[in-house]
Image (cartoon, helix red, strand yellow):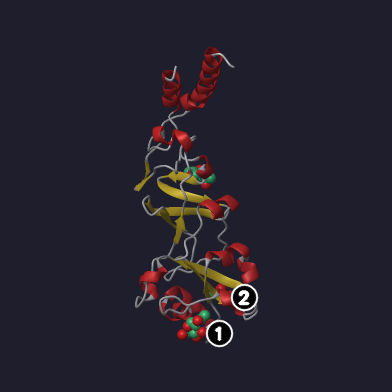
């Protein structure tokens, strides 16, 4: 049997060690621009859940950082656990921009993946594109819309149509397609992304919302959850006090 004093010392030591990083922290900002920041997110060192650290940057506005760029956070719904981001470098119905890939880290794909109602529209694909051949079952239409509509309705995409005097192939698909195949492999020159596609019946591409909706999971905070404040930082001094109270 351990003496109560040994156990007390052990816990005291453990608590003190936990206390040190907490003391070194500065305060955690609870907003960035117009976006509220709560657990599991954080923009300051040591804030938020460890899984999400380093994924955000607050420079006037809040940005979600992935290996392919900085995506402006438009909205976070903490009840539905969704976040809508927008890539300022992406083509939309009104602006054509040089193409690039959308890349997330393995961890991001796992803990904050795009939602099923976010659609990737691959545009100006070559006839050799895998999504027109072996993988054509990855393409779908949603809410009675076909991707050809984008060439006719959007000023930005009319150029594809003009050059060839016909509509080059295109494909509406999900995140998994672009996760496993780069734009080079897909052999499409541009893409755009649309959110909330299930609510777009009868609404034309000019009025769609362009962006990416991500769905995040909130990590279990364990037994210390009840003393974890909403600013997303573990309040170690409380644990310290609680341990002392047991004796
Ligand atoms: C975050 O924003 C600052 C200021 O705009 C910039 O200097 C920095 O490089 C950004 N960090 C990342 C990881 O993008
Ligand atoms: C569309 O794709 C073709 C190749 O398939 C390319 O030559 C052309 O430049 C692309 N159009 C635009 C506007 O990028
Ligand atoms: C989508 O709709 C277009 C035009 O109605 C049609 O030609 C195409 O076959 C449809 N694609 C799929 C995958 O259902």
Q: From the top left corner, tell me how far across and down residue 119 is, in percent.
A: 48, 68
Q: Quadrant of residue 207?
A: bottom left
Is 54 above or below relative to 100?
Answer: above
Instruction: Identify the disc placed on residue 175.
Output: none
**For residue 72, side relative to residue 14 (left or right):** left
**Residue behind mark 2:** 135
Question: Which residue is at 35% across, 75% downward?
Answer: 203
Residue 97 visible in the shown view: yes
Q: Quadrant of residue 130?
A: bottom right
Question: Which residue is at 47% across, 45% downward?
Answer: 57
User: Considering the numbered disc 1 on the image, is that residue within a helix, a strand or a loop?
Assistant: helix
- Circle 2 packing at 10 Å, graded few (<14), some (14-19), many (20+), is few
Question: Which residue is at 52% across, 68% downward?
Answer: 174
Q: Is mark 2 within 8 Å of ligand 3?
A: no
Query: Closest to the observer: 189 or 172?
Result: 172
**For residue 128, side relative to residue 35 (left or right):** right
* Quadrant location, the N terminus: top right
User: Considering the numbered disc 2 on the image, is that residue within a helix, a strand or a loop?
Assistant: loop
- Circle 1 packing at 10 Å, graded few (<14), some (14-19), many (20+), is few
N-terminal of the two: label 2 or label 1?
A: 2
Question: Which residue is at 60% across, 53% downward?
Answer: 106
Q: Residue furthest bottom?
A: 165
Query: Closest to the observer: 225 or 154?
Result: 225
Is 28 above or below relative to 95?
Answer: above
Query: Closest to the observer: 191 or 131?
Result: 131
| Mark-to-mark CA distance, 2 and 1 | 24 Å
Q: From the top left corner, tell me how far across and down residue 116 is, in percent.
A: 47, 65
Instruction: Identify the disc placed on residue 164.
Output: 1
* Quadrant location, the C terminus: top left
Is 5 above or below relative to 163?
Answer: above
């Amino acid at each position: 049997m351990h003496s109560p004093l040994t156990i007390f010392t052990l816990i005291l030591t453990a608590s003190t060690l936990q206390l040190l990083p907490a003391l070194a922290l500065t305060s955690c900002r609870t907003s960035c621009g117009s976006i509220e920041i709560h657990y599991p997110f954080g923009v300051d060192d040591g804030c938020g859940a460890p899984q999400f650290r380093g994924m955000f940057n607050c420079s006037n506005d809040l940005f979600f950082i992935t290996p392919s760029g900085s995506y402006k956070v438009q909205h976070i719904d903490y009840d539905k656990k969704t976040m809508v981001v927008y890539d300022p470098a992406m083509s939309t119905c009104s602006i054509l921009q040089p193409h690039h890939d959308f890349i997330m880290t393995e961890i991001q794909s796992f803990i904050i993946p795009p939602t099923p109602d976010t659609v990737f529209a691959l545009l100006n694909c070559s006839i050799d594109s895998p999504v027109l051949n072996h993988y054509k079952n990855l393409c779908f239409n949603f809410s009675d819309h076909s991707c050809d509509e984008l060439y006719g309705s959007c000023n930005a995409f009319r150029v594809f149509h003009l050059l060839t005097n016909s509509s080059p192939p295109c494909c509406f698909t999900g995140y998994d397609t672009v996760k496993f195949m780069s734009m080079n492999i897909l052999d499409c020159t541009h893409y755009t992304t649309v959110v909330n596609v299930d609510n777009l019946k009868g609404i034309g591409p000019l009025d769609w919302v362009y962006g990416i909706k991500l769905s995040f999971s909130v990590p279990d905070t364990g037994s210390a959850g009840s003393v974890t404040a909403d600013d997303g930082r573990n309040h170690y001094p409380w644990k310290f006090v609680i341990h002392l109270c047991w004796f």
